Amino acid sequence: MKTEKRKRPGFRLSFTARRAVAGRLFLLPWMIGALYFFVLPFIQGVVYTVNKVSFTPQGVQFTFVGFKNYLSAFTDLDFTKNLTSSLTNMIPQVVIIVFFSLFVAIILRGKFRGRALARAIFFLPVIISSGVVITVLKENVMSGVGMGMKEASFLFEAPSFEDTLSNLGLPQKVLEIFTSIVNQLFDLMWKSGVQILLLLAAVNNIPQSSYEVADMEGATEWEKFWKITFPMVSPTLLVAVIYSIIDSFTDYGNSVMRMVSEKMSQGYYEYSSTLAFIYFGCVLLIIGLVGLILSRRVFYASE
């Protein structure tokens, strides 16, 4: 006579529930990090902005001052000047970086000798993506310029280029923008590594059959770019634009970021926090506007 096995009493999770638990366990380190390194400092920063922080033998003392720190920031000529400079310099930098990245991605997609080496060179900034590294590189090159190294001076200084534009009768503001771009050419190329990686992946995901149909219809390379390549990579272009905007605003050489760091090192914690929050609000506003405007022009293959 066969005896039936009794089911052990207990609580058993379904397969879906077990997967959900596993997913939450994987997210747990990120959630802890976000709580301790973002949420809590964010709340502490908000408290700093509406108080005057002073250090006493008894500890840190907070004196509520309301929006006084914000009023001081908006009336600070240095801060408003640096903020305006950051906003105006961001636009040409982002445009150049994104289109340069798209151009390089299209070239690296093709088959030619040395393609692996070319990809490694352009992906080098992704591996060495440290502001400290690039600062050391620029300081070394600029010191070489000061010592009379002609081969190092061309990419970082453009007096002859400025003279040429000046002879064309261009406005002074236009001259400043163009010379600033030329002088920052090395920086802009260095900041294009992530965008090139994103756009190269997007270009490689375009079905080859689309180009074959275009060839059968007699389309030129220019027409294939605007009718196939550009629309298909437009979602990734939006990501690259937003990434470039954030990277420009948080750059190691950004004047506002330097000002916030200087005020923090001088002990003005409440004022530096106020400047950082105003800057944070401006960045969020610009990203929201850019995302809202460009998202309407983005082509999604599923639509």
Image (cartoon, rainbow, N blue to C red):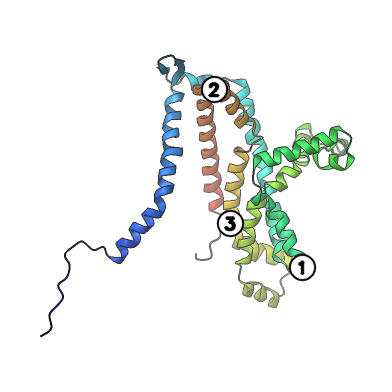
How dense is the environment of label 3, judged by Cα within 10 Å: few (below 14), some, or many (20 and up)? some
The answer to which of marks 1 and 3 sits earlier in the sequence is 1
**x and y, in percent, of residue 260 in the image:** 58, 27
Q: Can you see residue 156?
A: yes
**x and y, in percent, of residue 109 in the image:** 69, 65
Real-space Cα distance between discs 1 and 3?
25 Å
At label 3, the amino acid type is Thr
Q: Describe the element under mark 3 as helix, strand or loop.
A: helix
Residue that carries the numbered disc 3 in the rendered image: 236
Q: Nearer the viewer, mark 1 or mark 3?
A: 1
Q: Describe the element under mark 2 as helix, strand or loop.
A: helix
Residue drawn at (72%, 48%), measured in percent from left and top? 189
Residue drawn at (12%, 80%), measured in percent from left and top? 3
Up-down relation of residue 57 to residue 35 (above or below)? above
**x and y, in percent, of residue 279 in the image:** 54, 32
The answer to which of marks 3 and 2 sits earlier in the sequence is 2
Up-down relation of residue 195 to residue 91 (above or below)? below
Residue that carries the numbered disc 2 in the rendered image: 73
Residue drawn at (85%, 32%), measured in percent from left and top? 146
- Residue 277: mark: none
At label 2, the amino acid type is Ala
Residue that carries the numbered disc 1 in the rendered image: 112
